[in-house]
Amino acid sequence: MNNNLDSRVLAIAALASALAIGLSAKDAPAPSAPVLKRDASPVTDGKSGPVASYADVVEPVQKVVVTISTSKTVRVPINPLLKQFFGNQIPDQERKEEGLGSGVIVSPDGYILTNYHVVEGADELKVALSDDRKFPAKLVGSDDKTDIAVIKIDTTGLPAVTLADSDKLRVGDIVFAIGNPLGVGETVTMGIVSAKGRSGLGLLNEVGGIEDFIQTDAAINMGNSGGALVDAKGRLVGINSTIISPSRGNIGIGFAVPVNLAASVMQSLILTGTASRGYLGADGQELSPDLAEQLGLPASTKGLIVSNIESDSPADKAGLKASDVILALNDKTVSSKEDLRLAVAEQAPGTKVSLSIIRDGKPATIAVVLSALSGNSSSSELLPGVSAVALTDDARRKLGIDGRVNGLLITNIDANSPYVDSLTPDMVVMEINRASVSDLASARALLQKGRNLFYVYRNGAAGFLVVTVN
């Protein structure tokens, strides 16, 4: 072990000791990222023959997958008619909701990767290891935009997973999904990588949600969320996140967050407490064969032609120009808006990246120092604790909403939101104070302090609500 690695390990040990003796937040040292085991080599040379068993691959990985139990307090509103007659004399009731998910140990000192939706709103977290030891856990940080969360247990000497380079995955690679589906106990299922870079699926249900999923037919069921997707070398390639299924059971269409994206979010959550993302400040459109020919390029050229550059942004300062064609960011190919957005989001603010471009028919390279993406730019909150997104045709079909209905679809209401009694998930807000709404910006601009008149659609009918904004 080299001196730099020695110092990092000692720093982590010092932090754990400080927490154990109860140092105050003021006196405690700044957090340092865990030392991760990485192996970026390809999973196979493509020439190896079939094997009779993967037991030797799977057995060590089973030791790093944990079961996460959650508990949270949920408000149960009383009947509105009772409130009308008795006012606040009858308080809302509370009940405990239990949840179950999975997680993956990524460092010997107790850092665990899981899903945001596994730990969302939890008052209490408990972790059960494969050797049946149980620990209380604390939430280090979470990110709803990628469905990633980091929790920590207070122990050392744990087995830790090795991280692969998920960019090197190929469609057809064998993968294993490991977790605790439906609470039956730790389970291993096998499949292949069915597709890479799945996006635009609306699975995160968030404005600004970052979707770059690995799709697999390895069976993933409720309780597998947050568990490991590993390759044929037993290396972590993804964090199992969600499925598409009309029955909520596995039909072979499962999705995992690539480990490269998950690891970058994890580092930010541990070091800063937030999911800081890089910001470029440039936008464009996919280079079509017609556009390529007009620019004097081969029709087969793949890239993103820049159409908009924000003033004083990192792209502007670096000298990027409209009509430049972006081919790659560092070593990641860029052929669409989503490709560029994901490549930038994986980088930390302050990172210097290299853009491979074509300008005036000639290849060039531009160095750009990314800044921080404002957390407010992609906020999905309409009111405190109330998340909403613009109603899409896909959401209309899934929820059976009349095609003439337009507005904001409420996707989630926190249990502690002051609006939990008046608004409900899957409700569409069509108007606020007699003005139509189409996006969050217009809706927020229409809200006023005090009583607001909402025109909403729910359960197949339209109606009015009075919503008081404090």
Image (cartoon, grey):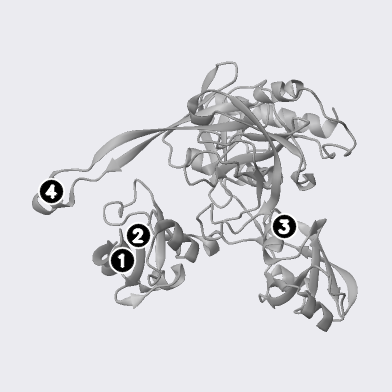
The image quadrant where one finds the C terminus is: bottom left
Q: Residue at x 34, y 37 (%)?
A: 73
Residue type for callout 1: Val
Quarter-of-image position of residue 338: bottom right
| Apparent side of residue 91 relative to residue 134 in the rendered image (left or right) | left
Tell us which disc is closer to us: 4 or 2: 2
Q: Would residue 242 be seen by someone viewing this image from the given angle?
A: yes
State how far apart marks 1 and 3 are (Cα). 38 Å
Amino acid under disc 3: Ala
Task: Give the spatial CA distance, label 4 vs label 2.
Answer: 23 Å
Residue 286, position as x, y percentages in the image: 72, 71
Q: Earlier in the sequence, mark 4 or mark 3?
A: 4
Residue 20 lies, in percent from the top left, at 56, 24
Q: Which residue is mark 1?
A: 456
**Left or right, residue 462 beside residue 86:** right
Question: What is the distance, in whole Å, between disc 4 and disc 3 at their CAs?
Answer: 53 Å
In the foreground, 91 or 22: 91
Q: Secondary structure at mark 1?
A: strand
Label 1, label 4: how far apart the Cα atoms are: 23 Å
Query: Could you classify mark 4 by the number of other residues whose Cα lies within 10 Å: few (under 14), some (14-19), or many (20 or more)?
Result: few
The crowd level at tag 2 (other Cα within 10 Å; few <14, some 14-19, many 20+) is many
The label on residue 427 is: 2
In screen coordinates, is 176 left or right of 48?
A: left
Q: Dot 4: what SS? A: helix
Residue position marked by numbered label 3 in the rendering: 343
- Name the residue furthest left: 85
Mark closer to the chain start, 1 or 4: 4
Indicate the quadrant containing the N terminus: top left, top right, bottom left or bottom right: top right
